[in-house]
Image: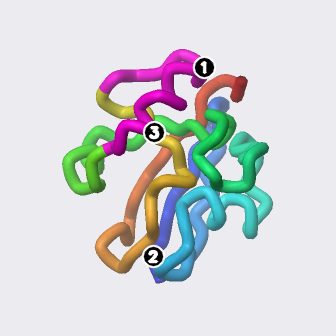
Amino acid sequence: MAKITYIEHDGTEHVVDVAAGLTVMEGARDNGIPGIEADCGGACACSTCHVYVDADWVAKLPEKDPMEEDMLEFAYEPDETRSRLTCQIKVSDALDGLRVQMPERQI
């Protein structure tokens, strides 16, 4: 299990335990976290699970693959460094303490 903090655009924080093997998107969905819509269900076919990863965590995550890079072009106000799709981040114990912030809206 990893404790992940999901921060809504207005600053409201939700700290939840997410089981290893799930994605950060599934952790949000399973815990009713607002702000992550996940319209494609985790298939990396949309950008509605877009978040900004806390700067301290950017280098600790696996690099974006080309498909994620392409989908992020459709996200709302993507940040070249901090933007990620939560469906592409697999949870492991190493992600304990991860902090992600949702954008103002999803597209």
22 inside magenta stretch? no
Query: Which residue sits furthest left?
Result: 59
Image height of 26 relative to 81, above or below: below
Q: Give the total number of marks visible in the rendering.
A: 3
Q: Which residue is at 27% across, 47% downward? A: 63
Extent of the magenta region: 64-80
Mark 2 and mark 1 lie on one chain; the one further toward the N terminus is: 2
The residue beneath circle 3 is 67
* Amino acid type assigned to the residue bearing label 1 in the image: Tyr
Q: Are marks 2 and 3 in contact (CB under 8 Å)?
A: no
Image location (x, y in percent) of residue 107: 71, 24
Horizontal side of 92 relative to 62 (left or right) equals: right
Task: Find the distance from the CA under tag 2 to the CA under tag 3.
Answer: 26 Å
Viewer-proximal residue among 16 and 28? 28
* Amino acid type assigned to the residue bearing label 2 in the image: Ala
Mark 3 and mark 1 lie on one chain; the one further toward the N terminus is: 3
The residue beneath circle 2 is 2
Task: Find the distance from the CA under tag 2 to the CA under tag 1.
Answer: 27 Å
The residue beneath circle 1 is 76
Image location (x, y in percent) of residue 12: 65, 43
Callout 1 crowding tier (Cα within 10 Å): few <14, some 14–19, many ≥20: some
Viewer-proximal residue among 106 and 14? 106
Q: Secondary structure at mark 2?
A: strand
